[in-house]
Image: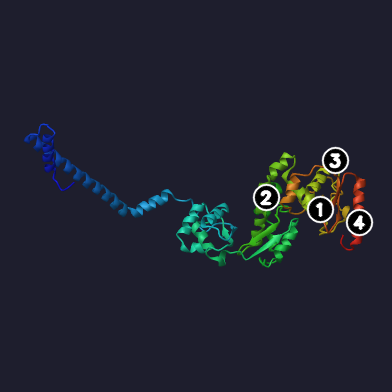
Amino acid sequence: MNGTSVDDQIDEGDDLNSHLGLRPASRTERRANRRKARARRGLGCFAGLVSLLVVGALVAGLVIGYGKGRDYLEQLFSAPDFTGDGTTAVTVEISKGQSSQSIADTLEKKGVVKSAKAFERAARDEPKSRSIQAATYTLRKEMSAKAALALMLDPAKSVLVQRIGFVSGSTKADVVRQLQASKALKLPSGAAEAALAKPWSLGLPSYAKNNPEGFLYPGTYDVPKGATAYTILKLMTGQFARTQAELRLPQVAQGKGLDPYQAVIVASIISAETNRAEDYPKVARVIYNRMQRKMRLQMDSTVHYVVGKDGGVFTSDEQRNIDSPYNTYKYRGLPPTPINSPGKDTLRAALAPAQGNWLYFTLVDLDTGETAFASTADEHQANVRKLQAWCAAHPGRC
């Protein structure tokens, strides 16, 4: 503003008025104008002072109340979290290159932490979280985020040691033998059988009637630190539950007029009778066609189950005459329980059999698993002769 005062500006205004031919302000008017200008200048200074005081007060309040304010905000936007060290064991696989956010999402889906955000915050506050390695961890369900992170940062306590696998079609007796022989578990004698003797604690579906046969889902399982036979059995029944949900087994079975237990029994017979996935739906159709016609199923696999025979193709006359509800040569309908634990493909085949009028099937080549299907007894006998010829050419194989 060129260093001129307000009074000077007002006088200059009088000169300008004179120049323009206007009436110059009187002395009284000039004094009044000077008082108004000073008042405006004072009011501006006062407003600036008030603004500074308000800002200062806010800053001071933020500084003084930072701790309480931070606590309030964190509480307001807190992430749901469990408390404590968790409950039952659960395995979690972390892949190479997973971000902390992805790890947090995985833990939430597995039920380890209550929310991914809780784990992300715990990891953010712990510099060592960047060193989480790719591995399969043994954690627990419903852990606090900090407890889960601490366990993952201690691989000696949480990282998987070994794995154990069970093939499709394993009976519960097979599972017991395999658990007892496992070097990873090192179970005391009788531990697996004792765990299996408490079926009500294994999480079986209600229609299983407290019989684990058929529900010890096949597959490869991680052996957690300190695992017992019960730990592995729970993993197996848990995987069956997930597979059942994926296939919507109870709903689909009931929609076809089947009890879900019957569907599992059919799937177990399929598992024992053939090992080619393309034949699963056809075998299922043979079973349903024979049941519909009130024919005996005449499945060697059900007889093998009750006599304890493992493998082989044929049954003897003596075995086929045994008095047992599992003897489908003697009794109509399905056996009373599954005869092994089927996998997803055989379960799916039991729910979605192929279309066809076949009433018979038989293996004709044990090396390839080729199975021949027939609609009449004469066609079936011709296929049986093919199997007999193969067996004659391969002594000791049948």
Q: Which residue is mark 4?
A: 388
> Which of the two discs, 1 and 4, sits closer to the camera?
4
Q: Which element is circle 1 on? A: helix
What distance separates the C-alpha of mark 1 from that of mark 2?
22 Å
Identify the mark nearer the N-term, 4 or 3.
3
Visible residue check, residue 204: no
What distance separates the C-alpha of mark 1 from that of mark 4?
17 Å
Q: Which element is circle 2 on? A: helix
Q: Amino acid at mark 2?
A: Thr
**Residue 376 versus residue 11: which sits nearer the camera?**
11
What distance separates the C-alpha of mark 1 from that of mark 3?
21 Å
Q: Which residue is mark 1?
A: 273
x and y percentages locating residue 336 in the rendered image: 78, 48
x and y percentages locating residue 82 in the rendered image: 50, 53
Identify the mark nearer the N-term, 3 or 2.
2
Q: Which mark is residue 293?
A: 3
Q: Are circles 1 and 2 on residues that touch, CB within 8 Å? A: no
What distance separates the C-alpha of mark 3 from that of mark 2?
31 Å
Q: Quadrant of the C terminus?
A: bottom right
Q: Which element is circle 4 on? A: helix
Q: Amino acid at mark 3?
A: Arg
x and y percentages locating residue 280 in the rendered image: 78, 49
**70 relative position to 48: left or right:** right
Which of the 4 image quarters holds residue 357?
A: top right
